[in-house]
Amino acid sequence: MDAAIPIAVLSVLIGGLIALLFFGNYFGKKKLEVEKIAKPIQKPPQKPSSKKSHPRPHSHAADKVRRHFASAFQGFRLGEHCDLSIMDNGFGWFYIFCGFTLESLPDEMTNVNSSKDLNKRHHPLDLNTLKGHGDSVSGLCFSSDGHCLATACGTILPMLSRAVGYAEVCGGACGDGVVRVFKLDDASSKSFKFLRINLPAGALPAAVSFVDDASSVVVASHGLSGSSLYMYAEEKPKSSGETKQQSKLPLPEIKWERHKVHDRRAILTLVGSTATYGSADGSTIIASCSEGTDIILWHGRSGKNLAGVDTNQLKNNMATISPNGRFIAAAAFTADVKVWEIVYSKDGSVKEVLKAMQLKGHKSAVTWLCFTPNSEQVITASKDGSIRLWNINVRYHLDEDPKTLKVFPIPLHDSKGSTLHYDRLSISPDGRILAATHGSLLQWLCAETGQVLDTADKAHDGDITDVAWAPRTIPTGDKQVMVLATAGVDKKVKLWAAPPTLAS
C-alpha cells in the first residue's frame, strides 16, 4: 500500500511534465505568430535575381483592396516597425491589421512635373492633370462661370465601408481631409493657383458644390458620428485698414454647418442648382442624397432644411437636380426612376416638393442619370445594358406620362461578351456629348445617336470617382474649349477636351 503511493505521485508528475512540454511548444508557436504580425522580420537586402518569382495564390477581392491601399498611400512610405496585412476570410469580408506610420517622400519624388510623368503617352484629348492631392479625390464641381474647380480629397476607406463596416473604416482612416479650389485661367497651364480649405478634425470630405458663385462652397463630409455639411465662404475684411495689413488673402470661414444630416448614413452625392424656374428667386438649392432612401433639400446660402423626400426603393444610387431647379430625380435599387417637382411660393422660397412622375422602361437598376441643359429631358444608364433618353416636358398633372425618346445599347462588353454598365454620366453644356465612365474607362458618346466618339481605356490609374463638364468653355492656349474634369482614386484630377462631334 505504501509503495503504491509514490508510484501514483510519480505518474502524476510525469503526466504534468508531458503536458507542460506540449503546451509550452503550442504557446511558443502562437507567440511567434503574434510577433510576426506586430513586428515583421527584418530581412537582409537581397541581390537582384534573374529568376521569376511565383506569387502566392490569393483572393481577387483581397487583391482589389490592396490596390486601393497602394493608391491611397502613393506619395508616402511606411516608417519603421510597420506592417500592413489584409486577409480575406472567403466570404467577402476583410480584416485589416495596421501598425504603421507614414512618412512623406521628398518633394523631388512627388513633383507634379516629374520627368517620369512627362514621358508617359497621353490620350489626344488629355489636356492636363491636377496633382498634389494627398488621397483619393472623391468629388469635384465647377463654378457657374467655369473658371474655378473645387475638389474634395477624402479617403478611399469609406468606399470600402460595405465590406468592413463604416464605423471601423472611418476609425482607421488616414485621409487628406482637404478641399481645394483651383483657378482655371488656362486649362493648358503648367501650374494652377488653388485655395486650400482644411475641414475640422475627423471630417473626411466626400462631395462638394458651389453656392451662387465661386466665393462659397458646401462640403459633404463623413465622420464617426455620421454625415455633416459645411458651408465655407470668404471672410470679408471689416475695414480698409485691415485690408492693407493683410499680407495674404483671407481664408474661407465656416458660415453654417449641419451634423448627422442623414443620421449615420453616408452622403453619396451633393448637387447644387440655381433655382430659376417659375417664381424661384435664383437662390442655389442643394440636394444631398444618402446611401439609404432619403434625399434632403437645403438652401445653399442659409443652410435651411427646405424639404425631404423618400425614394422607398431600398437604397439610393444617386440623385440630382435639374439645371433650372424645378425637378429632383433619383436612381435607386429598382429599375424605375422617380421624379419630384419643387414648388415655389410667390416670394421665391420653396413651398413643397411633390411627386411628379416615374420613368418606367428599364429592366434592371438605374446606376446614374443626368438632366439635359434645358431641363426638359433625362438620360439614364442601367444595369440592363442600355441608355434611355426621356422627355419629361409633359403635363404630368393631367396624367400625361413621360416618353422614351431613344434607347441606346451600352457599347461595353467583358471578356465573355456580356454587356457592362456605366458608373457615371455627365452631359456637355451644349447637350451634344455624353461622358460616361466604367471603372477607369472614360467614353464620349454622341447624345443624339449613342455612337462612341472617343474612348480613354485607362483614363486614371484606378477607378474614376466623379466626372463633370465645365458649364462654359475654358481658355486653352489660344482657343476656347469645352472641358471635362474627372477625379480618381489615383489622387488626380484630369482635364479633357471635348472630342469633335459627328456633325462638326
Image (cartoon, rainbow, N blue to C red):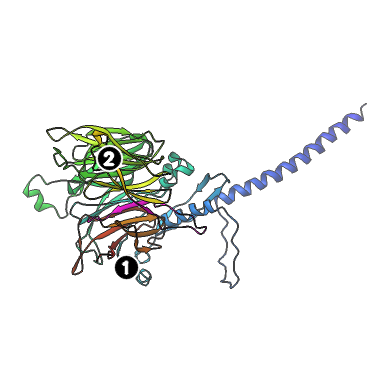
Q: Which residue is mark 2?
A: 328
Between 241 and 406, the one nearer to me in the picture: 406
Q: What residue type is disc 2 on?
A: Ile
Query: Where's residue 337, x and y in %?
Result: 34, 40
CB under 8 Å between callouts 2 and 1? no
Query: Which region shows up in magenta?
Result: 406-431
Question: Is residue 420 rendered magenta in the image?
Answer: yes
In the picture, residue 412 is in which quadrant?
bottom left
Q: Which residue is mark 1?
A: 113
Label the magenta part by its dominant secondary structure.
Answer: loop
Residue 292 is labelled as none
Label 2 Cα neighbours within 10 Å, binned few <14 / some 14-19 / many ≥20: many
**Number of numbered discs on residues:** 2
Q: Name which of mark 2 and mark 1 comes first in the sequence.
A: 1
Query: Where's residue 311, x and y in %?
Result: 35, 35
Q: Quadrant of the N terminus?
A: top right
Q: Quadrant of the C terminus?
A: bottom left
Q: CA distance from mark 2 to mark 1?
A: 42 Å
Q: Secondary structure at mark 1?
A: loop
Q: Is residue 220 visible?
A: yes
Q: Secondary structure at mark 2?
A: strand
Q: Residue furthest top?
A: 1
